[in-house]
Amino acid sequence: MKLRKISFGLLLAVFLTACGTSTGENASGSNTDNNAPEVNEESDESVVEEQDIAIEKETLTLEGTFVGQVDANSIEFKTAEDVYVIQTLETDINFDSISEGSSATAEFYENEAGQNILQSFKVKE
């Protein structure tokens, strides 16, 4: 019983120590914030330019054949040069109504993760 009380007391002390709050002051009493962002006024313009470049997406428009749906969120599209798997999350096209082997034009871009994201899809008649 005494061992349980000692174990419980040590466990409680560990929990209270882990849940304690830090005042952010070091031993000398000064508050040092290592996570504070550094402000460099000279580089603000270059950061904005880099963000603008990252926002621009290279859109590919290809003519080919609709092979079919890979899953609920992607299709397979075949051109003369290559076969593309294209994510369809940003569109509301019902690919069940498009017959496999249909000639079509697909417009898509490649995101940061290397995935092809569909922007528009038109079936040729």
Image: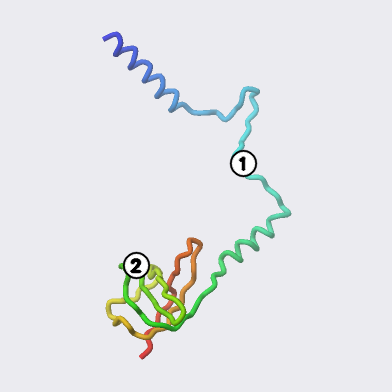
> Closer to the camera: disc 1 or disc 2?
2
* Residue 70, picture quadrant: bottom left
76 on left or right of 33: left
Quadrant including the C terminus:
bottom left
* Residue 8, picture quadrant: top left
19 on left or right of 36: left
Q: Residue furthest front?
A: 81
Amino acid found under the numbered disc labelled 2:
Asn
The Cα atoms of the two marked residues, 1 and 2, are separated by 41 Å
Amino acid found under the numbered disc labelled 1:
Ala
Sooner in the amino-acid sequence: mark 1 or mark 2: 1
Quadrant including the N terminus:
top left
Residue 36: mark in rendering: 1
- Give the residue pinned by disc 2: 73
Q: Residues within 10 Å of mark 1 (few under 14, many from 20)?
A: few
* Residue 28, picture quadrant: top right
Counting from the top left corner in percent of width and height, residue 120 is at 42, 78
Q: Residue furthest left?
A: 1
4 on left or right of 107: left
Residue for point 41% across, 23% down = 16
Residue for point 36% across, 15% down = 9
